[in-house]
Amino acid sequence: MDSKEQVHTARKRSIGLLAKATRQELEAAYGAIDGAPAHDVVRGPETGLVMVRGRIGGGGEAFNLGEATVSRATIQLSSGEVGHGQVLGTDGRKALLAALFDALGQAEGYASSVAAFVEGIAARIAAEDLKRAEQTAATRVDFFTMVRGDD
Amino acid sequence: MTLTANNNGTAAYRGGFGNPVLQGQGVFRIVMDAMARPGTIRSLEPAIVGVKPPAPLSSAAGAVALTLCDADTPVWLTPALRQSPAKAWIAFHAGAPLVEQKTESRFGFVERGGIIPGFGQFALGTQEYPDRSSTLILEIDALSGGPAYRATGPGIRDHVDFSPRGLPDVFAALWAENRALFPRGVDLILVAGPELLCLPRTTKLERREG
Amino acid sequence: MYVAVKGGEAAIANAHRLLADRRRGDRSLPAISIDQIVAQLGLAVDRVMAEASLYDRALAALAVRQARGDMIEAIFILRAYRTTLPRFGSSVPVDTATMRIERRVSATYKDLPGGQLLGPTFDYTHRLLDPSLLSDEAVDVPAEKEPLTEPVMRVSDILAGEGLIEEDGLLPQDHVPGDLTREPLEFPLQRDLRLQALARGDEGFLLSLAYSTQRGYARTHPFVGEVRIGEVEVELDLPELGFAVSLGRIQVTECQMVNQFKGSAKSPPQFTRGYGLVFGQSERKAMAMSLVDRALRAEEFGEDIVAPAQDEEFVISHSDNVQATGFVEHLKLPHYVDFQAELDLIRRMRAEYEKKQAGDDLREAAE
């Protein structure tokens, strides 16, 4: 039970990071694989919509905010592992590559290099997030009281 | 390179439309024509080539699911279908949510030999929105060679005779009840092998002895 | 009388060709790229995404270019495009509490957890035309500072701690969010549908309505509890996996408007709220949306419905600029036959009028 949860959590994180990888990152990593693994495309790549929901007041009942374009693909490796890729935007090739890495992440012989690739994406995003946070922090207002009217 | 359907328990991922746009349009056209001409038999071939859902869902029923069902159309399945990989197949390929309550469904599927629930248990639409109703896809033994029915109504010049095999005896009575609810009610798609026949709620049926 | 006419194909084809020419403009200037529009006209792109109800910066920028910068035309084009795509499903509701904040200000608390973060704002600029932008002068890189580690707490949660503000909007359990793109609107609406309509509503229309509430047409005593802009994760449940996965991030603007409420027989005096959530960076729209959302809740709070901003049918039916432009602009299409009928009618009435006048003159002359 616990280990299944852990596998889910790890895969969820990995899929989320693959969705945030750039096309260039995915292509480069794909090009670096020794011998492209045999696979079938089971579904897609195809582009459609996801209705993005918000919550009333931020935390209340859900409402439909508007849609976003999403591309997705599902592939199966010849060794049987199924991978899903779903990414915001209209780049089907990106979804296909994300699906391939999701499948390879479950495949013996590839899992560790996929993990390293995914951690590389995580590090790149963390660095970008930090940079933005620092830029935002520089616009934080430091109030100082000039005169306090007490009476 | 080919993969076996049961590799790793991934049957749900296999047997969808190879070309979703063209095959979906092909099946849609056939279903539309069949709905417009109730009681006539149409073949889904070759539009359903490659469609192989997990048993007990048939290719024809599966192709109709891929064509008509999506994230906006809740689907009800018989217990037998619900317990089979067909459930995951529909979820993956059609993206349709599964519902337990027949009244919440837009489509209902019954496999060959499965018990056909009373039509009144499904969504029947409202007087204002009769379209908010269920369409049932029933697989039966054959679309001919059974007891004879005579259909009349919109889309039918004079009358059309057909003789489905595998419908329960109470079918004529169930259909008459459904017909009486007009404009509310369910619509039916009967499938057998690669063929289908449609009975929209506007069609009147009469059992013919002989 | 109905007269079928044909013709104009060549004129239409040439008009489209002329449009393409004017859109491109002076060929000695480089054509503007989609990337340039996304990067340098980002707020125009955001408005198109918000009102087209489709989050995709590249497509919105393409629409802006195709529409020659006509925002409503761009919104129309993007709306039309979205109808060609299948819908894969609905996301898990985005969590604005965990937003990666780029801007966050509150008008109700000076020192609040997370602080006042101005971000890339037009506020405090002098609104003087900047001649340095006439040329491509170098721009300073942004300043940086170590971020605070404390979470950027919601203002509504601060007030909720004291029990002085209504809860986040609740609807009956098992409520399925309404979707106006799937089912026709039936008034009265629930708040979820109103918010969907407002989120895609015309910024100018909502701004004017919001302004009208401030001028006294349904006063709501508003304070900006907070406005926050930043990125949130979009997660989708994948039935094939059995859990939700992230598809990426989108930028949204959220406004929590805090409004006074004197209380009623059922509820004690407390603050009530209006809510705004918009795709992209669009503070004006989010604020206007939250003011109009609050005004439209008049009936819920037993307030008199006396002003346009409180009239749900009026506001929601007229907030969509694609619908509005379609109906207004259709007037320029051929109405030759209708007009002929009107012309005949006016001529007949005029003839009768003149006959009557002549009769009156004769009678007067005879008297």
Image (cartoon, grey):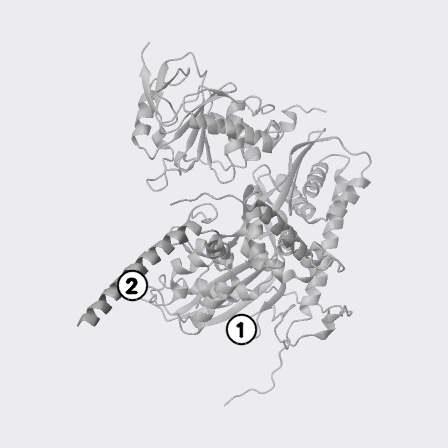
Give the residue pinned by disc 1.
C107
The type of residue carrying mark 1 is Ala
Q: Residue drawn at (60%, 46%), measured in percent from left and top?
A: C10
Residue farthest to the top? B210
Residue farthest to the front? C366
Residue C140: image location, x then y, percent: 76, 70
Circle number at residue C354: 2
Q: Residue drawn at (41%, 27%), measured in percent from left and top?
A: B188
Residue C295: image location, x then y, percent: 41, 65
Compared with C88, C58 (above or below) is below
Hey, which quadrant is residue C123 in on the image? bottom right
Q: Is residue C166 visible?
A: no
Compared with C34, C219 (above or below) is below
The answer to whether tags 2 and 1 share a subunit is yes
Residue A116: image location, x then y, percent: 77, 45
Q: What SS does tag 1 mark?
A: loop
The chain carrying label 1 is C
The type of residue carrying mark 2 is Glu
Residue C163: image location, x then y, percent: 44, 66
